[in-house]
Amino acid sequence: MPKGAASNLLFHDSDWNFETLSRTYDAIETIALDELHLDVYPNQLEIISSEQMLDAYSSVGMPLMYQHWSFGKRFVFEEHLYRKGRRGLAYELVINSNPCITYLMEENTMAMQALVTAHAAFGHNHFFKNNYLFQQWTDASAILSYMEFAKKYITKCEERYGTSEVEVILDSAHALMDQGVFRYRRPPRLSSEKERERARERLEYEEQTYSDLWRTLPPSPDGHNSKEAERDASERKKALNLPEENLLYFLEKTSLILEPWQRELLRIVRVIAQYFYPQRQTKVMNEGCATFVHYTIMNRLFDQGRISEGSMLEMLHSHSNVVFQPSFDDPRFPGINPYALGFAMMQDIQRVCTDPTPEDRDWFPEIAGSGNWRETLIDAWANHRDESFILQYLSPALIRKFRLFLLTDEAGDNYCEVASIHNERGYQTIRTALARSYDVAANQSDIQVVDVDLLGDRHLRLQHNVKNGILLDEASRDATLRHVRHLWGYDVSLAGVDAETDDVLYECSTAPTSE
Amino acid sequence: MPNFIDRRLNPKDKSLGNRRRFLKRAREELKRTIKEQIKAGKIADVDAEHRVPMPERGVGEPSFQPSPSTGERQYILPGNHEFTPGDRIPKPSARGGASGAGAGTGESEDDFQFVLSRDEVLDLFFEDLELPDMVKLNLKESVAFKPRRAGFATSGSPTNINVGRTMRNSYGRRIALRRPSRADVATIADEIARLEAESNASSAHQKRIEALRQELDKLERRRRRIAYVDPVDIRFNRFEPQPLPNASAVMFCLMDVSASMGEREKDLAKRFFVLLHLFLKRRYKRIDIVFIRHTDEAGEVDENTFFYSKQSGGTVVSTAIEEMLRIIEERYPAREWNIYAAQASDGENSAGDSDLCVSLLHRQVMRLCQYYAYVEIIDERETEIFGTTDNGTSLWRAYRTVDSEWSNFQMTRIARPSDIYPVFRKLFARQPTMQLRTERR
């Protein structure tokens, strides 16, 4: 590198200080906003130590989290792996909030800090702000204050009702977290802090003025005849809005045994589950977006002569570790790496836009050769989730590059069959299958509340719509049902019904008498 | 300019409370599991395994999870080299296939294992058990004392004088007080002798001799006054009697292997003994086990034969007790060994022999033993009849008389594997009888 250019470098060695961080941030920001046209929340970068990173891990990556033993378990687990050197710490952690909070570890070198800034503070940040799922389903500006409320509320409950009382409710609620999100209709927005405060005060007032004596009033003399009861039951059922797929929501609203504070706990768990739901549907895109952004920005900085070759090599080393995809027969194979797939797809889109092959022109007539890869990517980031993104943009060239193939596996057989490989006939099938494997709603067991006889035995009936014959693991199923029963207070049964034939495949119940 | 915040000085260990909660829970869970394991009859495994994996259940977080062994699935995998459509790949057995299964679904529960060492497990297991008469081990019965060097003393018997130390003291004192050495005296004496021999009569010469004589006299007096070895120099070797803790125990396992002891009965007895052995092993540095089995005659056997041989015959219980007494006399003097005995039987005994057993116990065995546990293995159906009453086999009824008189005798009945642990606890629970027993001695 010529000597004159050295003065242009953002940083020279691996030590960092706040001045360097800030100078580098500005350089990255210029590229991100002016050249890549990213649109981000204001950034807040926080420097933390490695212990604090472990802490942050164990509280599901939230800066504020209520206390629960399962987070302790996660900590012990992560620490164990970390201490044994089996797993490194993430270099960064980013929180979908406004302002967007990014954690930088103090142990990182300056080159890593630059990489992380580009990756998290711009890549993830842009994705959080612009992707439609996050826009619709999460409220970035409210989450931190909500978490603060949740933490305080749960601490208060622990003081008032005892830690173990709170713990059993949280245990049960956590078991149903996957069944605690609205998948198809929009959840009610988090009400503002003030409104919540008012609702809580109202509840407390009701608790104070509640008199148990009212319960002992004699029933009205004419009573209910059976016909009336039946009508009532159907009305109640209608009012309950069954079937309901959000188990936690149903229990929170309908359970007859829960105290108001217990309902609030369910609600807290549910809100958090809902908050993380979009992240689960956009893993490939989110990481791909962040990786693509940091890769592009770093290369641009290098081209401008603002990063030394040594730093660039260090970044490339980390980068290639992150996007490494071992083959299926490699002992390190953990599944498809979302970083690798996402990054490759986005680079592929860039290639298709600027330098298409005839094949690309066939497959992507709208974007091939259009040249404006930035707009194409920004549009894709905003309007897709993993499933639709793969379905639309996975190109034959990439399928060949990854040498993807499709295996079908039937439980009864003792072999798997190769259904399609990366050839002309297989592209479509592989693309569709890969997309479907990222459809969270399709891959999760579909369990709904279908019936409850509130005036009779209050037996809660759940139905599992079995797809492709995939049943539930029995041990965890029964354990989870016991959690449902705990929250519901009465017996709960679960029936597995084949989604296509309506045959009942299995039935199980928490009632002691039935099988 | 972004907003930088330095959080490094923020309090660490935010998750400390969570970790505490988790460990508390894990511990409770482990205790429960181990008790269940014992009930399920895996005592020997507990002893054999050095690490016990933390069970998933109590610290597991269940949720509705698809079962990997059902249904049809599709996986997309990278890195195809040789396959063409229609190829069949044998499924890797058991968990090997999971790498494929994880591919599509993305998420799977981590198989978290909380590993405890065997010692920790056993600590949990024996947490609130205590052998009776631990007093004997600590204080009462330290029969042997061994003198141990413990520095020096200023008083003692002449045989214990430590010459080296004494002489060192005396030498120091002599230097400090400037006791004239023999050489000093000799020099002056020589000088006098030389001068006298010169036969010089000058007054200066005489004066010189006179001065030397006075000097010599002074030295002699000084030597006399300052002793070569003074009583204050003397040091004696000091010995302290050190009690030798009687940290060895012998455990006698007496088992009836007569025809009436079937597989079930032997199995129950075995589990009881394993438990007892585990327990004693925790308490004593050195523990011997003597296996005595008996039909109508008794014999000492090794462990394998004890539990697994198929020998059978009639029943004379007293033979086993006699054999035990013989072995105690031969190899395990009661002064040096803590003796424990556990007898398992179905209670069937030949007529009249029970009385002999009781008298043997009364007269000899109970005086020698720290503890004698009798476990009667009965039919499950009998539990309802005999569970609480004193009725039962001849042996049981006979032993009642021993039970009433000796507090270090315990007897109980077992019908199921699940009874063993509670019974064991009952037998070896901390007992308020310890004082009684020591008074009687």
Image (tube, rainbow, N blue to C red):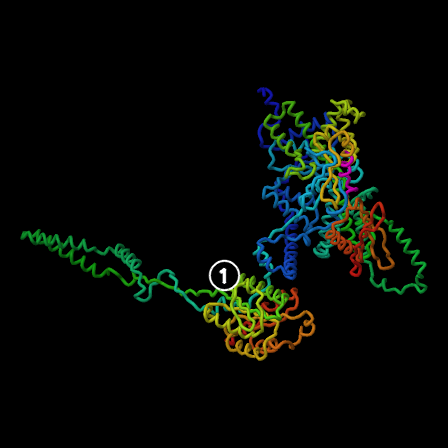
Which residue has dot 1 on it? B285
The residues colored magenta run A431-443
Magenta highlight on residue A405? no
Residue A487, placed above or below residue B133:
above
Where, by quadrant of the figure, is residue B84 drawn?
top right
Q: Position of residue A504 (x, y in %)?
A: 83, 51
Does residue A106 appear in the picture of this structure?
yes
Where, by quadrant of the figure, is residue A140 drawn?
top right
Q: Amino acid at mark 1?
A: Lys
Does residue A123 appear in the picture of this structure?
no
Q: Is residue A390 left or right of residue B235?
A: right
Where, by quadrant of the figure, is residue B244 drawn?
bottom left
Q: Position of residue A350 (x, y in %)?
A: 73, 26
Give whichever of B401, B76 is nearer the camera.
B76
Give whichever of A82, A140 is nearer the camera.
A82
Give whichever of B234, A135 is nearer the camera.
A135
Q: Position of residue A237 (x, y in %)?
A: 88, 52
